[in-house]
Image (cartoon, rainbow, N blue to C red):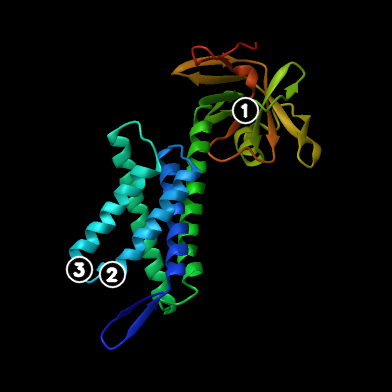
């Protein structure tokens, strides 16, 4: 263990706790950094750098009284860890990863200080490992969840189109998500799905003028009959070009997802995998 004497007081720092704290925290910070920038990484290199960072951290108490040297060691160690932890395609990529590593480090440091101050904990306590790792783990979990959400939204947005649906001269402009999992047909008509509230709002005053039907829809809990209606027309806009379809059925679903109003049928869509060009396949 390390011992340092202050103004009439002695603080004991256990080397094993410093090592464990820093190995875990540095590993999580480096992992979060590369997750944010989209860089691949080797777990072995991350673990090696985590041990390297922990060893450097042992030096801090010995030079803490020399503020300038202590600050330089902290800064240079950050540059060193990100340099050794990965291989970068350019200097710019290396600097970006280093900047994010520093930002995450500051955020985690603030969270750790906040937790210790709120609960009045002693920084030299032997249970410091759990207390210090907790905010880091929470931060990394939030980062990972955010990244997954962003990439999921990005993938979804590529298949969301502006759509005009018309029934009895009433037209609504909505967002439609083209879902390849929607293989539902009403006879020969492809089916688009919407939530019940949207269906009622859109059909609304025309309920007594139109012929409703029921379609068997498969769900996780089984098959159910949902109300539906044949639309007069549907327009799907791809690159500002309107693609018009007739003989399309609008059917109620339990839920269609967040960020769009309709689940479109894959029959509306054809993708050229060589040129990655989206185009509509006529169905009527």
Q: Nearer the viewer, residue 11 or 144?
A: 11
Drawn side of residue 96 relative to residue 25, left or right: left
Q: Nearer the viewer, residue 186 or 20?
A: 20
Q: Disc 3 or 1, which lies upstream in sequence?
A: 3
Q: Mark 1 = which residue?
A: 179
**Label at residue 28:** none
- SS label for mark 3: loop
Which residue is located at x 58 percent, y 20 percent?
234
Query: Looking at the image, is 66 positioned above or below residue 157?
Result: below
Which of discs 1 and 2 lies nearer the camera? The answer is: 2
**Residue lying farthest bottom?**
8
Q: Mark 2 = which residue?
A: 62
Which residue is located at x 41 percent, y 80 percent?
120
- SS label for mark 1: loop
Specify the quadrant that holds the N terminus. Answer: bottom left
Q: Nearer the viewer, residue 271 or 72?
A: 72
Drawn side of residue 113 relative to residue 197, left or right: left
- Estimate the x, y position of residue 160 in percent, counting from the top left: 52, 28
Q: For the residues marked 1 and 2, what is the alpha-carbon distance in whole angstroms? A: 61 Å
Tag 1 and tag 2, C-beta contact below 8 Å: no
Q: Nearer the viewer, residue 59 or 114?
A: 59
Q: Mark 3 = which residue?
A: 66
Q: For the residues marked 3 and 1, what is the alpha-carbon distance in whole angstroms? A: 62 Å
Q: For the residues marked 2 and 3, what is the alpha-carbon distance in whole angstroms? A: 9 Å
């Amino acid at each position: 263990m390390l011992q340092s004497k202050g103004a009439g007081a002695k603080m004991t720092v256990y080397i094993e706790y410093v090592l464990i704290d820093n190995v875990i925290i540095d590993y999580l910070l480096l992992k979060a950094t590369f997750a944010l920038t989209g860089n691949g990484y080797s777990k072995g290199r991350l673990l090696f750098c985590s041990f390297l960072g922990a060893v450097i951290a042992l030096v801090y108490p010995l030079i803490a009284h020399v503020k300038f040297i202590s600050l330089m060691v902290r800064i240079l160690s950050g540059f060193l860890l990100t340099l050794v932890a990965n291989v970068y395609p350019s200097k710019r990529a290396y600097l970006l990863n280093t900047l994010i590593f520093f930002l995450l480090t500051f955020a985690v440091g603030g969270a750790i200080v906040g937790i210790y101050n709120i609960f009045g904990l002693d920084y030299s306590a032997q249970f410091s490992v759990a207390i210090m790792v907790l905010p880091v783990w929470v931060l990394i979990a939030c980062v990972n969840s955010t990244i997954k959400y962003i990439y999921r939204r990005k993938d979804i947005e590529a298949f969301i189109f502006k759509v005009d649906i018309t029934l009895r001269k009433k037209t609504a402009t909505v967002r439609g998500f083209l879902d390849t999992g929607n293989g539902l047909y009403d006879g020969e008509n492809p089916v688009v799905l919407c939530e019940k509230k949207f269906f009622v709002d859109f059909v609304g005053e025309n309920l007594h003028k139109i012929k409703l039907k029921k379609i068997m829809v498969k769900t996780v809990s089984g098959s159910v009959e949902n109300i539906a209606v044949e639309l007069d027309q549907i327009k799907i806009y791809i690159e500002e070009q309107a693609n018009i379809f007739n003989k399309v059925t609008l059917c109620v679903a339990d839920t269609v997802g967040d960020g769009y109003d309709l689940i479109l049928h894959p029959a509306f869509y054809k993708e050229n995998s060589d040129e990655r060009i989206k185009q509509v396949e006529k169905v009527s």
